[in-house]
């Protein structure tokens, strides 16, 4: 029943928002005031282009260090991740 009301377009909130938008749709002339204010704002500080790859490399190095320092934990996390992603646990034929 609710879907019928929405499809017919008689949802009171939609009607109120549409009426409000019609009331404020006209352009408000400000004689360039907004453009002058925006031109006076400081430029957005852009991050250096090398920052993102370096941060990603640091995370890879940190992950590798954890994997080397705690191989059992790494194996358990990797095993669980593979089981979650593929929906089937890995079989282990080794000594573990």
Image (cartoon, rainbow, N blue to C red):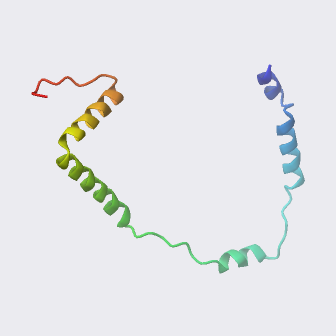
Q: Which one is in front, 21 or 2?
A: 2
* Residue 24 image position (x, y, % from top left): 86, 56
Instruction: Give above or below for 34 relative to 91.
Output: below
Quadrant of residue 12 in the image? Answer: top right
Q: Which one is in front, 75 or 32?
A: 75
Instruction: Give above or below for 27 relative to 72.
Output: below
* Residue 53 image position (x, y, % from top left): 33, 60
Q: Which one is in front, 40 or 69?
A: 69
* Residue 50 image position (x, y, % from top left): 35, 67
Q: Name which residue lies at 34% across and 60% down.
A: 55
Count of marks overlaid on the render? 0
Quadrant where the image shows the C terminus = top left
Q: Name which residue lies at 51% across and 73% down.
A: 45
Q: Name which residue lies at 26% across and 55% down.
A: 62
Quadrant of residue 52 in the image? Answer: bottom left
Q: Name which residue lies at 48% across and 70% down.
A: 46
Quadrant where the image shows the N terminus = top right
Q: Which one is in front, 10 or 84?
A: 84
Instruction: Give above or below for 72 relative to 92.
Output: below
């Amino acid at each position: 029943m609710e879907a019928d009301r929405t499809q017919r377009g008689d949802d009171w909130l939609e009607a109120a928002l549409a009426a409000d938008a019609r009331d404020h749709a006209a352009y408000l002339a400000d004689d360039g005031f907004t453009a002058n204010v925006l031109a006076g704002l400081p430029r957005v500080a852009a991050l250096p282009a090398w920052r993102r790859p370096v941060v990603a490399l640091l995370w890879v190095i940190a992950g590798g260090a954890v994997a080397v320092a705690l191989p059992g934990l790494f194996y358990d996390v990797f095993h669980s991740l593979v089981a979650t992603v593929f929906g089937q646990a890995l079989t282990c034929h080794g000594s573990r």
